[in-house]
Amino acid sequence: MSSADQPAAGIQARFVKRFGSGIEICVDELRTGTRTGITVLFGASGSGKTTVLRCLAGLLAPDEGRIQFAGEVWDDTARGVHRPPQQRRIGFVPQNYALFPHLSVARNIAYGQHSATNADRHARVAEMLRWVGLEGLERRLPRELSSGQQQRVALARAVVTRPRLLLLDEPLSALDAPTRLRLGSELRGLLRQLDIPSLLVTHDRQEALALGDHLLVMDNGRIIQRGLAHEVFSHPASLAVAGIVAIETVQPGRIVQTVAGLVTVAVGAAQLTVIEQDVLPANGEVYVCIRAEDVIILKGEDTRAASPRNHLPAVVRAFHDEGPIVRIDLDCGFPLMALLTRQACEELALKTGDRVTALIKAPQIHLIPHMMAGGGS
């Protein structure tokens, strides 16, 4: 069979789901594209992410359109096709884990292996317990486990049937912040070991970056940008995406000149040097996007030897304490936000009214043309 004749890997979906309240989820194109890897469906609460996931799982039927996986049709409204979840061979981890409270860890994991022999069932459960690091806890009930342990039981239960696709709905949202940070990398490691495609829903930026290979950004029931996770977060295609991925500084600007691959942009009372980008508007009107973590602050020293092209005199206006990190409002001819660790902030002995220099590398500034301000890609 030639590569052109082989069934497409991953998910291919185009569908509409309507609700009586008038809400409409319209997926114009959803492709995961590869046989393995982690795709993150990202957006604010209420953007339609969980509805999309439940349609892919077969828990909801689309009102229009088609969903297929690896060339196999799961939904086709024109032909009246709707395969129920058990015929899709998927693993599904709901937001609240949905463990059976009266069943032990082992029996929760074994649930769903109806056709397996007792010997196979016990072998697979033992394998899953080793995989998620819960050996010795197989007789415990869910209420006797930590949130992180419950998450691993839910993941093991979803994987024990050897699914072809794994779907996870906000898998870390039920955890407190320190546990979420610790288990994020652990979950990514477990998903990496599976060697099956995974689609994960989240509204948390750190979670999306920590877990995702590819990112689909949703807003008002539609996918408005897609791409590699780090690229989407660094290069939003529209103001809507910039807001969803929480870029801290977004300011209107005007292109002054373009010379030798470098663009000079006037922003407020300042000028920035930016690497030339693919789409620049003829009228020169743009929005300038800068992530707070890409801003370097220097105080009381000669900055001429520093490598970033943009050296902006600035005044510290306010501090926002966020535990181990501090967000700092700067005025450098336009409002600019910087992000420092608490230790770095203390070492600089920063206080309101201090004069500092904000350094920004040219490649870390992203421009959105005015003509693309409201749309996506």
Image: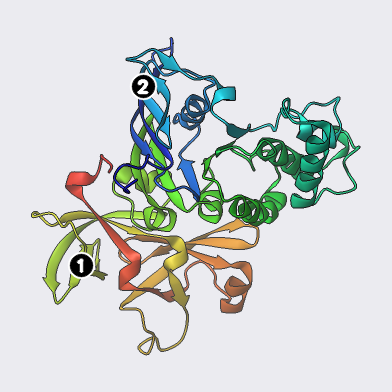
What residue is pinned by disc 1? Answer: 276
Mark 1 vs 2: CB contact within 8 A: no
The residue that appears at 69% across and 56% down in the rendered structure is 182
Q: Quadrant of the C terminus?
A: top left
Residue at the extreme front:
1
The residue that appears at 47% across and 32% down in the rendered structure is 49
What is the x, y in percent for residue 107?
A: 83, 31
Total of numbered circles in the picture? Answer: 2
SS for dot 2: strand
In the image: residue 311, left or right of residue 147: left
Please, is residue 368 above or below residue 32 in the view?
below
Q: Nearer the viewer, residue 125 or 271?
A: 125
Which badge, 1 or 2, comes first in the chain's sequence?
A: 2
Please, is residue 5 above or below residue 354 in the view?
above
Residue 245 in view here: no
- What amino acid type is highlighted by mark number 2? Val
Residue 277 in view here: yes
Q: CA distance from mark 1 to mark 2?
A: 38 Å
What residue is pinned by disc 2? Answer: 16
What is the x, y in percent for residue 9?
A: 41, 43
Circle 2 crowding by C-alpha within 10 Å: few under 14, some 14–19, many from 20: many
In the image: residue 51, left or right of residue 179: left
